[in-house]
Image (cartoon, grey):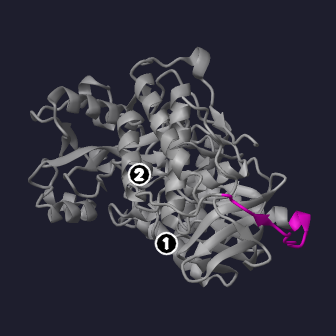
Amino acid sequence: MKKQTEPKRYLISFDSRTTAHVFTDVLVIGSGVAGLSAAIQAARHNTVLVVTKERMDENNTAYAQGGVAVVLSAGDTVSKHIKDTLDAGQGLCDAVTVKAIIGEGPKRINELIGWGASFDKEDDLLIFTQEGGHRFPRIIHAQGDSTGKEIEQTLIRVTKENKNIKVFEHTFIIDLITEDEVCHGAIAWHAKKGKMLIWAKRTILATGGCGQVYRETTNPGVATGDGLAIAYRSGATLQDMEFVQFHPTTLYIAGAVRFLITETVRGEGGILKNKKGERFMPKYHPQAELAPRDVVSQSILKEMQKTDHTHVYIDIRHIPKERLYSRFPKIREICASFGIDIARELIPVRPSAHYMIGGVKVDRFSRTTIRQLYACGEVACTGMHGANRLGSNSLLEGLVAGSAAGIDASRSIQRSKRELFPFPIQELAGGSKISWLDLNDIGNSLKSLMWRDAGIERDEKHLLEAEEMIEMWCRYVMDKEFANPTGWELQNMLLVSRLIVASARKRKESRGVHHRSDYPETDNTHWKRHIAVKRQKS
């Protein structure tokens, strides 16, 4: 196999003398829970520009059905939540980060409530539910199964009311502008305005995950791993890229888009059954349906293989109809569109790629290894989740780590008191601008390959095959200079896929969401450690 070549530093050619310039104190890339939390905090003392590649509300946050895990109920404690998180993370969580994020959770949730976020209540008290891996009911929800949407709409409203924040929608960030491992902003593209250089004193990456590199995913089409790729090209360190979490239960209708069936359905008493109608989770784990996600996903996969079937089922027919309909209005609506009445029929489900646990390595202030660059939310690797994210900890992390990024960026600007000085920069990407490649075909082939060879179950043979195929595609895609997001997204997805596969090959054990059939045991002697990746300077 040929030696892997590092990606180009910049995907496109540009010249600062002939490109439009935009100036801001803080540039926030992404408009989900982490990005908007960062923007709101940074805007207390600075001008902020939020850039998002689609509409402001098109992101993973808006699709998050599950709730927020937070210590607000009587009898729950920070130490209990920490223990559940550390147990799920299987030895790779950063205990200091876990304590800090869980400890600050109540403050950030109360802040959201103060801004008008409406979480579900009974007799004017918050309702708490229990999910897999949690030993205590500490999950709050909004409108039953639309928690992410409520949080996102609240943050959007606060953002729009803030005179210090501007928003550029439908604007694609192609690369970060760096010099001597210091970030000075980014190069962006808009369909009508063309290329622009955005100069910023501090830049915050909050671009979300990369579920779209897999054929089966709960993520929306925007989740193509752009932030991971641009951070890697800029020289930032990435960590734990092998740890991709698969959600155990997504609605499986052949040919239809995968739709998340939230963990709370099992928390409310939903039972998993195989093709024969047999309940199977008790034989895999003492917590049965409430086992951690990695266990449930792997158990479902085993049952599908044993019964030679494309999916399993969730049975919630024993739960009173009124409760089901009020608790899961969105799930009821989606299932009904496929002719399934959740109160009377089984729901067909199978696992799908859901959450990138790894990402851009950051410290407790959300600082990356590149100066003046921050990362928060799913694009970042804080150490909160270890080898397996505990359900409903992601919205919590996005709120807390996003706020931390905005606060620290603001403070560091005040400390340095430097003005914004753009510098001349000319970049010749040197790629062929002519291409007859079928980008959609390559993209679909990549997704199928990743699902088959680097999915829930992995082994050396299939990971090696994936590595060779991705490298082949890279050789004739990465040298091209594309003029629109379709090409840039494919280049980003190829790069991210390559990093996932390389890290998965390297980790010769099974831990959390990373399951190697050829190394089925957890090896604490050799592998109770992180795998970091960084672009080698050419």
Q: Residues within 10 Å of mark 1 (few under 14, many from 20)?
A: some
Give left or right: position of 171 versus 313.
right
Instruction: Name the spot of residue 242 as percent of width and height, x first.
Output: 52, 36
The answer to whether residue 238 is above or below residue 33 is above
Residue 174 lies in quadrant: bottom right
Q: Which of 428 and 374 is in front in this view?
A: 428
Q: What residue is drawn where x is 57% and y is 65%?
A: 30
Q: Residue furthest top?
A: 525
> Considering the image in quadrants, where does the N terminus appear?
top right
Q: Which amino acid does label 2 sit on?
A: Ile
Mark 1 and mark 2 in contact? Answer it, CB < 8 Å.
Answer: no
Give left or right: position of 359 versus 323.
right
The answer to whether residue 366 is above or below residue 410 is above
Residue 41 lies in quadrant: bottom right
Q: Residues within 10 Å of mark 2 (few under 14, many from 20)?
A: some
* Mark-to-mark CA distance, 1 and 2: 23 Å
Inspect this view and state whether residue 138 appears. Answer: no
216 part of magenta stretch: no
| Label drawn at residue 34 | none
SS type, badge 2? helix
| Label drawn at residue 442 | 2
Instruction: Name the spot of residue 16 as percent of width and height, x first.
Output: 78, 73
Q: Which amino acid does label 1 sit on?
A: Glu
Give left or right: position of 363 versus 336.
right
Q: Mark 1 points at which residue?
A: 54
Q: What residue is drawn where x is 56% and y is 33%?
A: 503
Q: Give the range drawn in magenta.
A: 414-430
Instruction: Name the spot of residue 88 as percent of width and height, x first.
Output: 48, 34
Give left or right: position of 480 versus 347.
right
> Considering the image in quadrants, where does the C terminus appear?
top right
Q: Which of 378 and 438 is in front in this view?
A: 438
Q: What residue is drawn where x is 71% and y is 69%?
A: 14
